[in-house]
Each structure stands twice: as C-alpha cells, then as structure tokens.
Image (cartoon, rainbow, N blue to C red):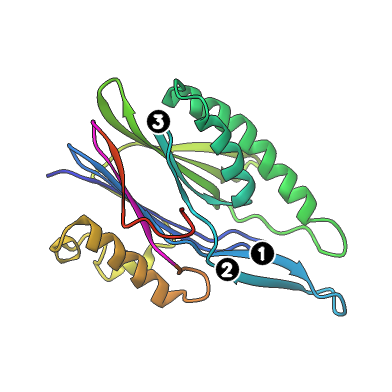
Amino acid sequence: MKKLITVLLFVPFVGYSQTCIIAIKTKNKIIVGAESRTTFPGINPITHERLVKFEDTVCKIWEGKNINFTISGYPGSKLISFARTLLKNDSITFSQFEERYKKEALKIVLKAIENDNKPPFPTPTYQVGKVLTDIILFGRENDSLKMVRISLVFLDDAKFHWWQVKERDTIGSGETAEIESNNILYDKNTWKNGYIKGIEYLINYVHDLYPKNVGGPINIIEVTKRKTRWIGKKPPCY
C-alpha cells in the first residue's frame, strides 16, 4: 500500500524548540502524531543573555469539522492561534485555508523576527533554505482524503517563499539525517506493528537524540472519509 510519510524536524533560530511531527497518508486514512515540547525564550536580568525554558505544554494537532492542521515553526504559538481562527469556519476549503494562512503567517513571522532582533541582540544570520515554519493541512474534501504540507523558506535572494511539497510515497524534511541514514524511516520493520506504534517509535527515537528539545506526551489523530478520532488523547491536547 502506498503511503505518504512526512517527517518534520524543525530547528528555528532564536530560542525555539525542535519539533517532531509524523503524518501518514494511505488510501483509506490519514494518521498524524506529534509530541508536545516547546521552549520559552527569556533574558537573564543580570547578564542579559538569552535563556530557554522547556515545557511540554503545546498541542501541535488541531481538529476542525473537515480540515485539521498540525504546525511547527517560528513563532509556534502565534501561528497556531491564527490557524485556529480559520477552523471556526466549518465551510472553509483547503485552498481558502492555505491562501489566508500564508498571507497572515508571513506577517506573523516577520513581526516575530523584528521583535527578536531588537538591541542588545544582533540580527541573526539566515541560513539559505532554512524552513521557518511548517503546516500540514489534512482532512476530507469532496468525499476524498487530502493532505498538504506548506513551508515558509528563506532563499538566497534574501526573500521568504512559501513552498508546497508535492505528494510522494515518503517525504523527509528538516533534520531527518539520523532517521534516514539509519534506514529507520524507510525500514518496513518500523511499521511492522502498525502505524500507531511506528509513529511513537520514530518520535521516541528522535527524543533520544534531542532529549531537551523533543519530548513530552505524544498525541495521535486518525482521519477517514467518515470520521475523525483521537487515539488515546492526552494532555496538552485536551
């Protein structure tokens, strides 16, 4: 059975956490899993150095009537808040969601960059090709299942561009080098006990590599043409 696997391991600049999100699309269902770790940047009042606090308090999967989303990026909480407002419109289509999100998300990211670069901190150096934020839209449309991933990328012409990943059997994005080089993402043994166990295994594997940045409760959601259900829903997704 063909499947679309998207692995997002996002490492933003300026004190935000990595994220591990895994989304699988088969002919009959979409299954998405994400951990819940995030960071809160701060400033040492004496040394004026940046501080980072880690907490497992962010639900990265949000459910709508027909469209759901999972998001990682900079600045995560503000992007999530805006995307949630779009879900209030039960009749919104994938294309409408994408158009409105891309327009506002770019403003949010640019404003966050402006705020984070105020003195006494220097302007960060942008890495060409760096993904600043990712969103995966998934759900039902016109009696079919659909999943779209959109990334905001900094390119070498000193501009930010939205990049949409075309569906393929397997997609690896971000810092997936360890998973891919060890053949874990593509190994059939990863999925021998089913997609749920496979998702949990991959996220825990990444947690072992980056224990400070990836971790906390793992939430998983499943979408079919008929219904959407959480599999063992846990905080912070209550």
Residue 199: x and y in percent read 29, 60
Left or right position of 168 against 76:
left
Residue 103 included in the magenta stretch of the image? no
Residue drawn where x is 16% and y is 43% of the image: 2
Identity of the amino acid at label 1?
Phe
Q: Residues within 10 Å of mark 3 (few under 14, many from 20)?
A: some
Image position, residue 170 (x, y; %): 27, 49
Q: Which residue is mark 3?
A: 65
On the image, the x and y values in percent for residue 187 come to 18, 63
Asked if residue 146 is positioned above or below residue 195 in the image, the reply reads: above
Which residue appears at 53% of the width and 57% of the height? Answer: 58
Relative to 218, residue 74 above or below: above
- Is 204 in front, or is 65? 65
Tag 3's secondary structure? loop
Which callout, 2 or 3, points at the residue further toward the start of the chain?
2
Which class describes the residues within 10 Å of circle 1: few (<14), some (14-19), or many (20+)? Answer: few
Q: Residue at x 28, y 68 (%)?
A: 201
59 above or below 27? Answer: below
Q: Which residues are magenta?
A: 217-226
Give the amino acid type for the residue marked by disc 2 in the picture. Answer: Glu
- Mark nearest the camera among 2 and 3 is 3
Spatial distance from mark 3 to mark 1, Cα to Cα?
A: 31 Å
x, y percentage for residue 147? 34, 36
Query: Mark 1 to mark 2: distance in Å?
Result: 8 Å
Based on the displayed image, in which of its 4 quarters is residue 44 positioned?
Answer: bottom right
Cβ atoms under marks 1 and 2 closer than 8 Å = yes
Q: Secondary structure at mark 2?
A: strand
* Label number found at residue 215: none
Drawn side of residue 114 relative to residue 88, left or right? right
Circle 1 sits on which residue? 40
What amino acid is found at the position of numbered circle 3 in the picture? Answer: Lys
In this figure, which residue is indicated by the disc labeled 2?
55
